[in-house]
Image: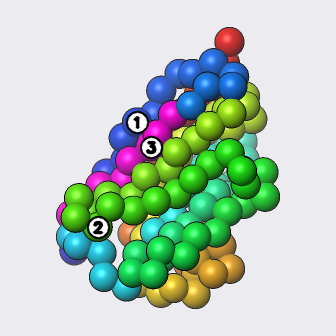
Amino acid sequence: QLQLVESGGNLVQPGGSLRLSCAASITFEYWAVAWFRQAPGKEREAVSCITTSDRKTNYEDSVKGRFTISIDNAKKTVYLQMNSLRPTDSAIYYCAAEPRYSVCTRLAGEKEYDYWGQGTQVTVSS
């Protein structure tokens, strides 16, 4: 059974950087691993996704050029490097995984992912 644990959330000033980590309990084979975020009063939205074997990536428009998703298969960990952070990036960030590449190709919504972490809080404020 796959378990996911996020870490790295923190309070950061606008323009700052954070790196989130998503550690898995098993080695990823052919999985799509995504980062979602949910701000108070808003729906959970997909931010970025990576396919674990060929490392193809996808990003939501507002984070393109600022966020980078990557994977270390040896460490069974997916990272989200977040630069040039804005107050609008403030949210709980969740890691999710699904053994279908297609969900990553089209940056699918939360209903298509079966495995979730508990979330980590990111607050961007001066």
Mark yes or no: residue 4 visible. Answer: no
* x, y percent for residue 77: 32, 58
Identify the residue position indicated by label 2 in the image. Answer: 73
Horizontal side, residue 103 vs residue 99: left or right = right
Numbered disc 2: secondary structure? loop
Horizontal side, residue 112 vs residue 62: left or right = left
Q: Report the residue at 23% width, 58% height from top.
A: 75
- Front position in the image: 119 or 78: 78
Is residue 20 located in the magenta-colored stretch of the structure?
yes
**Placement of the N terminus among the 4 image quadrants:** bottom left
Is residue 80 located in the magenta-colored stretch of the structure?
no
Disc 1 packing (10 Å; few <14; some 14–19; many ≥20): some
Numbered disc 1: secondary structure? loop
Q: Residue 95's image quarter?
A: bottom left
Disc 1 or 3, which lies upstream in sequence?
1
Horizontal side, residue 104 vs residue 76: left or right = right
Looking at the picture, the colour scheme in use is rainbow
Q: Report the magenta residues as a range.
A: 18-25
Residue 80, compared with residue 76, is above or below; it is: above
Question: How much space separates mark 1 and mark 3, taking CA atoms?
Answer: 5 Å
Which of the labelled discs sits on residue 20, or is there none?
3
- What kind of residue is marked 3? Leu
Mark 3 or 2, which is nearer the eye? 2
Q: Report the residue at 68% width, 80% height from top.
A: 106
Identify the residue position indicated by label 1 in the image. Answer: 8
- What kind of residue is marked 1? Gly
Q: Report the residue at 68% width, 45% height from top.
A: 66
- What kind of residue is marked 2? Asn
Q: Residue furthest top?
A: 126
Horizontal side, residue 92 vs residue 44: left or right = left
